[in-house]
Amino acid sequence: MFKKKLTIFLIILAGFILNVLSVQIVGSSFKYLQGSLNASIDQISYIMSASLIAEVIIIPFTGWLARLISTRVLFLISLGGFLLASLGCAFSNNFFFMVLFRGLQGFFGGAMLPLMTASIYTLFKKNEIPMILSIAATFGVSSIALGPVLGGFLTEYLNWRWMFLYNIPIGVVVLILAYFFIDLKDAEKKLLENVDYKGIFFLAASLISFLLFIEEGERRDWLSSNFIIITLGLSIISFYLFINSEVKTKYPVVDLNIFFIRNFFIGCINVLVFSVTLYVPIFLLPIFLGEIRLMEPTDIGIIISTLGIAWMISGPFVGYLLKFIGARVVVIIGCFFIGSGALLQTQITSEYMFNELFFSQLLKGFGAQFLWIGNQYICLASIDQKKVKNASSMFNLILRLGAAIFIALSSNTLVKWQKIFYSEISNTYNSSFFYYKNEDYNMENMYSLLSEREGLIMALNNITFISMWTVLIPILLMFYVKTDNKKELLY
């Protein structure tokens, strides 16, 4: 029986890995995409974020859809749609179609994240969960950091289109295996007779408006733009109407009562910290390596993947430790590692390369594994099995929303702080002192470029310094975790 359940889980995990890789795979190859698609710097960010935005839209509905049409059918639809969208991305010849298919890729693939998470707690017994968590984190979630190196390698040695083509043969094999081996008949037909149309509409409207607000805010100078004000207003109003609808309906698309479960609520706060400490560095570090160090995509990917490799190596040990020291201690250890790694990256200079970044990336990779496994166990292990699919969707929605919000904030902050530091550095120079009579040699221009470079580095260091302190939040919250049942390994 265990082998059968493990087979089902590994098939779902394989689909999840393909999706996770696809989200981050373009991170180190944006310059190649920009040239091939004739896209501006602003436009290329849409290609990078379209998948993430579409994921956020589908994730909250995944738990409800799995109950409505069954885990098996939803997984087959998700993986099949994901593969077709990947094919569309590979053969896109302009910016519009690339964004369209990237969005579809994220929309179909996004459902596989909550499905994978929920399957851990619905398929396996409590004493089996730590081992399964280790497998999921070792081979699944760590793929977040391995995407850029794969994308860089495929782009540099083959062609950027192979970033989307490589997963077609693999995905087809997984799809065939899923068709024959996933036999979960867990559909709840009564939901079809009581579809929460209002809840679906208001939640979708709120998420789409909010994501437009986040994505376009920096480009349109935030609240100085009428478009941004309107999208923010629509998001708030739609969210209020969604809450009002869900508390009144008998069959809500999202059961909000799970947020009154203390451990789940704490886990959701901690996963926001996780999104700060993982997604923001993966976003910022390639900027430093590409703009300051002028590194090739493959080299950037190798440095970023150090975090993912550390994550993979530590996976089996974290699951083992969970049984002996409990989830709370695991989370605290993870926060210590992440904070230490972040501290080492608050003093980056223009000379930093692989050797200087290696140890800090290792520490953050180890820490991310500890924090992820410990926190997910705290959050979901005590949830009733009937509510796990819904809880998994909300947990992963908050992770993705946190990533979108904090990446947008860090991007906006980076631009503003670079200008501030550039101005401060430039003002220390007396322009007349650096201008020589030789017209071919203008020291003022050289120092302007140096000021711009150092301003960017200082901005990066300051953002890293602020994000470092967020690891204190999970440590403090561990004192409030409910630990009534010793069998739940919370200790």
Image (tube, helix red, strand yellow):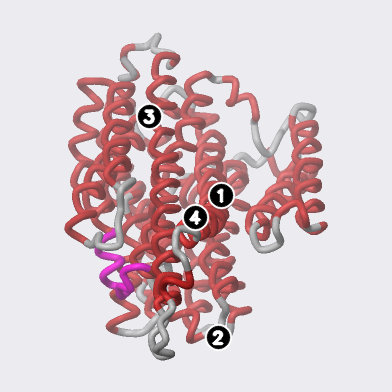
Separation of disc 1 and disc 3 at Cα?
29 Å
Secondary structure type for disc 2: loop
Separation of disc 1 and disc 2 at Cα?
27 Å
**Magenta residues, as a range?**
292-304
Q: Residue furthest top?
A: 484
Q: Earlier in the sequence, mark 4 or mark 2?
A: 2
> Any magenta on residue 247?
no
Look at discs 1 and 4 and give the one toward the viewer.
4
Q: Earlier in the sequence, mark 3 or mark 4?
A: 3
Disc 4 target residue? 424
Separation of disc 4 and disc 2 at Cα?
35 Å
Disc 3 target residue? 377
Q: Which mark is residue 91?
A: none
Secondary structure type for disc 4: helix
Q: Earlier in the sequence, mark 2 or mark 3?
A: 2
Q: Tell which of 204 and 329 is nearer to you.
A: 329
Q: Position of residue 54 (x, y in %)?
A: 59, 58
Which quarter of the figure is the C terminus placed in?
A: top left
